Image (cartoon, helix red, strand yellow):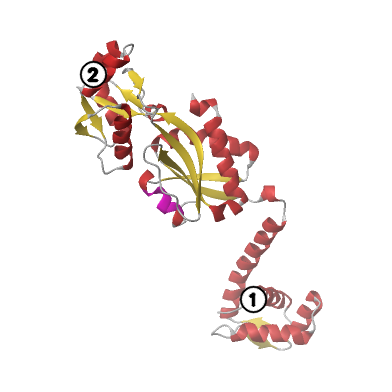
Amino acid sequence: MKWTFEQLKTFKVVAELGTMTSAAEALGFTPGAVSQQMAALQGSVPRPLFARDGRRVALTDAGKTLLRHAAVLLEDERRAAAALSGPQSEQRAVVAVGVFGSAAVSAMQPAIGHLRNSSPNVAIQAVEVDVETMPQAILESRIDIALGLNYADAPQPPLRGVVSQTLHREPFLMVLPPSAREYLADPPALADYANNSDWILPPVDTYFGRACRFACARSGIEPNVQHLVTDTAVSIALAESGIGITLATPLMMGLRPTDAPTAVMPGESSRSIVAIVRSSALERDSVRAVRDALVHAFSSSAVIG
C-alpha cells in the first residue's frame, strides 16, 4: 500500500470535517487538490474508504480502520520530526557496547556515570560478546562499539573499515600458590620455581592461551601446563588452592580477588584494552560520546586502581 503522509493528513481532516470543501478550506488547498489526494489514497487500498451521505462523506468500516492507524502514524511522524528538528541534547540514542568480563566490570559503571553528566540523552546497552569474535560482531553491525583486547606478543591484524584506540595497558601477573611467597624477593629463585612448577593456562587454541604462551617464552619460562582452564576466576582459585601457577592481569584480578602471592611476569609482556569501532559509526555523535566515556573510564582511578 503506497500512501503518503500528506494523503493521510488530508484524509484525517476530511474525516473530521465531513466534506472535501471544508477540508480544502482548512488546509488551504483547492477542492480539486483534496479530491485528487483522496482518489490517490483510495487507489492505494483494496477496499472503499468513503460512502456518500448526501453532500457529506462518511467513512466505511475500512475508512474507520485506516483513520485509527493514520492517527498513530501521524503522531509518530510529528514526534520524530520534533525530535530531529529540536535541540540535539533532547535526542535520545542507545549505543550497543560489546563487553567481556574484566573490562565490563571495570569500565561500565564509570562510563555510564560520565555519560549522565556529559551526554545525558545517550545510553549504553552492554552486550556480552566473546572477546575472540568481537571484531566480527563490529563488522556485522551487531554492536556499535566494542571493548576488545590486543596483546603485545600476539597483535590482532587490522580490519578494513575498523579502527581501534588503546584505552588501557596492563602487565601480565603470575598468580602463585601460597607456598611460593618466599620466592617473591628473589627473582632468579622465582624464575627457577616457575620453570619447575605445574601451570594452569587456557587452551592454546584460544587468543588468551596463545598470548600466555608467548608471554612465557618472552620471560624465558617453559610452563609445564597440567591444567587447561579458560575461566579466569577458576584459574585464580586453583592457583590460590596451591595446585599451580596461572597468569592474569590487574583488571582480571578484579573478577576474583585473592590473597595468593602475585608477581609481575618477567619480560614486560602486556595486554591492551582497546575500543573497536567501524570508522563510519564514528560519524554518529552518540557513538563518539560513548567512546569518549570509555576513554574517561579507563583514565579514572576507579579503573586503574
* Secondary structure character of the magenta stretch overall: helix
Residue type marked 2: Tyr
Residue occupying the point 53% across, 49% down: 95
Look at the numbered disc 2 and give the secondary structure of its residue. Answer: helix
Quadrant of the image occupied by residue 37: bottom right
10 Å neighbourhood of mark 2: few (<14), some, or many (≥20)? some
Residue occupying the point 65% across, 51% down: 91
Front one among 25 and 231: 231
Front one among 116 and 207: 207
Residue occupying the point 28% across, 37% down: 230
Position of residue 145 relative to residue 4, above or below, is: above
The magenta segment is: 133-138
Mark closest to the chain's N terminus, 2 or 1: 1
Q: Is residue 142 visible?
A: no
Q: According to the image, label 1 marks what residue?
A: 4
Q: Is residue 115 visible?
A: yes
Q: According to the image, label 2 marks what residue?
A: 193
Position of residue 155 relative to residue 302, above or below, is: below
Task: Indicate left or right for 52 with 300 as reference.
Answer: right
Residue type marked 1: Thr
Q: Which is closer to the viewer, label 2 or label 1?
A: 2
x, y percent for residue 66:
59, 75
x, y percent for residue 156:
40, 45
Task: Indicate left or right for 18 with 171 as reference.
Answer: right
Answer whether residue 149 is magenta in the image: no
